[in-house]
């Protein structure tokens, strides 16, 4: 007669061997690690005029192909004549803006006056540089009026390198908008002799209309820009804010 076939249960692995298998490195080509950053999208623009400055940013916050909220301002008013607009990773943006606001309150208590626009620009640069080994994943525009009452725009990279200019753009819509700003606003080199005025020569209304057109165009192509644009105008009379609706799809 044929031999009976018997089935035996596999022996359980030794605990030490099982623990060692869990500690083995992942197979080649399998990525594992900590990813601390995300890009929340959005676009910011700032234009400096002779006696004013205009800052605009959209209100959409995204993650990948998901819209997390349609009403999320990217601007923060640090003082009566200074505004910061931030794009990039929203958690880092909020942490950075909270830090700057606290530093401004301490400065105001110690000196009995608000921090000037140029001083705030230097503070932002130092704050970003201090975090250069684990940087804030943010791209900032700081704008306001200097001590002479002229408009000033400061543009930054993620680790604090900055320059003063008469206009700038940051965020996911930058590639779509900056060439338009160059065409409409770019002025002669500051190295020319005799020196020529570097500020935008148009009116506040012209600058606002240009920003509205730029955002409306960017919202057609950039899925991370849309819903609404918040526009902040700073001049000798103070600060005012207006909002324009954008595409919501």
Image (tube, rainbow, N blue to C red):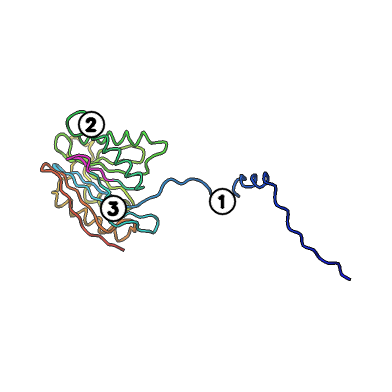
Q: Residue furthest left?
A: 237
- According to the image, label 2 marks what residue? 107
Q: Which of the two marks, 2 or 1, is nearer to us in this view?
A: 2
Name the secondary structure under disc 1: loop
Give the Cα distance between marks 3 and 1: 36 Å
Name the secondary structure under disc 2: helix
Ranked by sequence position, the earlier of labels 2 and 1 is 1
Give the Cα distance between marks 2 and 1: 49 Å
Image coordinates for residue 80, horizontal then vertical, percent? 17, 40
Principal SS element in the magenta part? Answer: strand
**In this rendering, would 135 be left or right of 10?**
left
Give the Cα distance between marks 2 and 3: 28 Å
Name the secondary structure under disc 3: loop
Ranked by sequence position, the earlier of labels 3 and 1 is 1
The crowd level at tag 2 (other Cα within 10 Å; few <14, some 14-19, many 20+) is some
Q: Which of the two marks, 3 or 1, is nearer to us in this view?
A: 3
Image coordinates for residue 67, horizontal then vertical, percent? 35, 58
Which residue occupies the foreground of this view, 237 or 177?
A: 237
- According to the image, label 1 marks what residue? 30
**In this rendering, would 130 be left or right of 119?**
right
Image coordinates for residue 187, horizontal then vertical, percent? 21, 44
Q: Which range is magenta?
A: 77-85
Q: Residue at x 27, y 43 (%)?
A: 141
Ranked by sequence position, the earlier of labels 2 and 3 is 3
- According to the image, label 3 marks what residue? 72
- Could you say which quadrant of the image residue 140 lies in? top left
The crowd level at tag 1 (other Cα within 10 Å; few <14, some 14-19, many 20+) is few
Image coordinates for residue 215, horizontal then vertical, percent? 25, 56
Q: Residue furthest bottom?
A: 1
């Amino acid at each position: 007669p044929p031999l009976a076939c018997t089935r035996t249960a596999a022996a359980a692995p030794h605990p030490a061997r099982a623990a060692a298998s869990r500690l083995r490195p992942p197979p080649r080509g399998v990525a594992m690690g900590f990813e601390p950053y995300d890009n929340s999208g959005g676009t910011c623009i700032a234009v400096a005029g002779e006696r004013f400055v205009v800052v605009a940013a959209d209100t959409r916050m995204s993650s990948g192909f998901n819209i997390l909220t349609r009403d999320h301002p990217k601007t923060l008013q640090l003082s009566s004549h200074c505004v910061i607009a931030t794009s990039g990773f929203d958690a880092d943006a909020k942490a950075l803006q909270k830090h700057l606001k606290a530093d401004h309150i301490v400065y105001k208590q110690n000196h009995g006056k608000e921090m000037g626009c140029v001083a705030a620009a230097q503070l932002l640069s130092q704050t970003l540089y201090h975090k250069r080994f684990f940087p804030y994943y943010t791209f900032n525009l700081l704008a306001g009026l200097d001590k002479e009452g002229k408009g000033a725009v400061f543009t930054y990279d993620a680790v604090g390198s900055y320059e003063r200019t008469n206009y700038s753009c940051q965020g996911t819509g930058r590639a779509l908008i900056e060439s338009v700003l160059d065409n409409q606003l770019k002025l002669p080199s500051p190295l020319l002799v005799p020196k020529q005025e570097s500020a935008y020569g148009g009116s506040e209304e012209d600058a606002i209309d240009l920003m509205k057109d730029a955002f409306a165009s960017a919202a057609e192509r950039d899925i991370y820009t849309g819903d609404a644009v918040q526009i902040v105008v700073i001049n000798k009379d103070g600060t005012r804010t207006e909002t324009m609706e954008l595409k919501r799809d």
